Amino acid sequence: MAKPRVALFITCLADQFFPQVGECVVKILRRLDVEVTFNPEQTCCGQPAFNTGYRDEARTVARRVLDQFDDADYVVAPSGSCTAMVRVFYPELFAEDPALLRKSQELQKRFFEFSEFLIKVLKVEDLGARFSHRVTYHDSCHLLRELGVDEAPRKLLRKVQGIDLVEMNDHKLCCGFGGTFSVKFPEVSVPMGQDKIRAATETGAEYLVAADGSCLMHLAGLIHREGLPLKTLHLAEVLAQR
Amino acid sequence: MSETGVYSSEIHTSGAATIANPRLAEAYRSSTLRLFNHRLQAIGEVPGFERLREVGRELKRHTIENLDYYLSTFADNVERNGGRVHWASTAADVCRIVVETVEAAAAQEVVKGKTMVGEEVELNQALEAVSIRAVETDLGEFIIQLAGERPAHIVAPAIHKTRKEVSDLFVEHIKSERTLVPEELTSIARRALREMFQKAGVGLSGANFAVAETGTVVTVENEGNIRMCTTVPRVHIALVGIEKLIPRLSDLGIFLRLLSRSGTGQKLTTYTSLLTGTRREGEDGPEEMHVILVDNGRTKALADPKMREMLYCIRCGACLNTCPVYRKIGGHAYGWVYSGPIGALVTPEFLGIGQARELPFASSLCGACREVCPVNINIPDLLLHLRAEAQEHAPQHSKSLVSERGMFRLWAWAMTKPGVYALGSRLARWGQVLLARQGWIRKIPAYPVSQWTKSRDFPVLAPQSFRERWKKL
């Protein structure tokens, strides 16, 4: 069988703030004998504008994405949120343009969140990773509820050697990031984040791990401001550890 | 500002005040958690509850799509059973019809069962204006009536009150003895209300369901007060939102299960009343039954093929109990009578988006509401739709140099030009050295990031972006 050709959708957040997440994804996929490509034409999926109600601006950005991955068997993104944007909300965004709608529906079938891709498509659980720490996994909402992915990241984490994976209370509760909600309602977003950090800390975990850089940026920013000992990592960063 | 008093921007100040008030914050936290857990347990006992939700949704969808037919069938059947049907387009219509009916019955007192439509149209104020005394007989409603407040929750209107506060209200308003024992507080209310049931000439109720096939008004409750309101006084008035219709009596069982298990975690509420027409020979019940079918903004939602879905709501309150935002900011922050995720849909839809612009944004779009909705309303999707509507009808702020839309236009332009995007990120990296300390920025004075850095640090841009590093990977 020919190597599957996987195009990365690295997300603007990882591109600018957390490039190491992208590198870990590349490392893991290459170990699994996948041909990885990256189209530098990509920028953002358009979600910030879409979630804030600016649909025209979102469409302007999103329609470029539709044409950027024609030659790939799969598109993989290290984010449940951006994947949900493409898979769930693009068809809504392009509902009134039959050609673009068809294109988005076609892309939808090939577009996967990273952990989901490993479990569902490549059908691997054990990546040979080693990480001897207590870890708790935070379900990011779009990954959990728009894509219905809750077991895939846990399956992958459980196979990590030395890991002590513990569940926190209310692990399905939102961390309070919510895109522009985080700056429109900081007075609510912040206490939600504090609850999440408390729940994670109560497990005795050293690391809070999630599959979305946006939740992690919010939580890590709060942890750093408050000088707390909890550390955050993206799922791919844990899975790439040897 | 609206006549109904929605100040949607106050959601920020009111919400923050609740968060900062340890007593209120704890009341909301513990009560919503209790209801949330009760629901979880109750639905776990029903095999195939998921299927039940789908069936409930489909029934509601069908009814709303054919509402004209079901409304006229229902109205015909109410009249056939000896009831009288009134159609009310607006809040003012509802109040006028109620006042006229009470006056025609020569009644000075009205006992009320819990009705959200009554809250919505501010019926108590309208009755008070013509010197008719309206007494809330639901314990929670009774408490907030004494306190002069709006309901803080669709199902549990006094969810935010502690027993100490309830006791204080009773001492002040009904001169009762001071007690913190819940049973004794209930007895105090019961004694005060019992007297009113006997005196009142008119009983008023809402409706949980309206069965088209039989012309039956269905109410569910735990205190028995609604049954008293609808059977003891000579005249019964039922306020029925037009979305309350269900086709057949045989559909009712599905909705009773969905409602009671989702709302309070009960198998069935203690009382379920099926009110079909006026008193018959040898039975008790009211001599007159008036059913007021209320629009008040509902047909506006009906006319929008997307927003129509919100009319499937059976007002169980489960979305409030699960919502991390409602749990924090509480019900009053939503500015009107409906709160939580469903309130963020209902208020802008019924009153107009201009009156409640902030509400659709008061959500992290986490989807927890959709997960518990007994009729699977895609609440986050509808909130997104309303956000788009809110931006389309955004007032133009001529004073601000950079509007939000302007910022997003600029952003969209940059995002479609990878060269501009890459250049922008390089400039930002160069600029951030002035602000960065060990990988974090403590304060960025420019909106919207300034809102972020109020309580959170902001990460610095990586020394090299992924696209730059890719070349070497």
Image: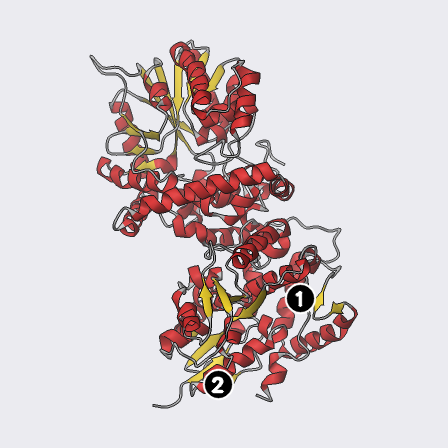
Relative horizontal placement of residue B38, taking residue B122 as reference (left or right):
left
Residue B268: x and y in percent read 30, 35
Q: Quadrant of residue B288?
A: top left
Q: Residue under mark 2: which chain is it in?
A: A
Above or below residue B240? Residue B59 is below
Q: Secondary structure at mark 1?
A: helix
Determine crowd level at label 1: few under 14, some 14-19, many 20+ residues with C-alpha closer than 10 A: few
Residue B80: x and y in percent read 24, 24
Near-viewer residue (B414 or B393): B414
In this orientation, does residue A96 appear?
Answer: no
Quadrant assignment for the C terminus of chain B: bottom right
Query: Are dots 1 and 2 on a single chain?
Result: no
Residue B400: x and y in percent read 74, 53
Residue B415: x and y in percent read 61, 72
Residue located 64% across and 64% down the image: B409
Q: Quadrant of residue B115?
A: top left
Residue located 34% across and 13% down the image: B234
Q: Secondary structure at mark 2?
A: strand
Q: CA distance from mark 1 to mark 2?
A: 32 Å
Which residue type carries mark 1? Leu
Quadrant assignment for the N terminus of chain B: top right
Near-viewer residue (A100 or B125): B125
Determine crowd level at label 2: few under 14, some 14-19, many 20+ residues with C-alpha closer than 10 A: many
Near-viewer residue (B391 or B200): B200
In this orientation, does residue B309 appear?
Answer: yes
Which residue type carries mark 2? Val
**Where is mark 2, residue-wise?**
A36
**Where is mark 1, residue-wise?**
B410
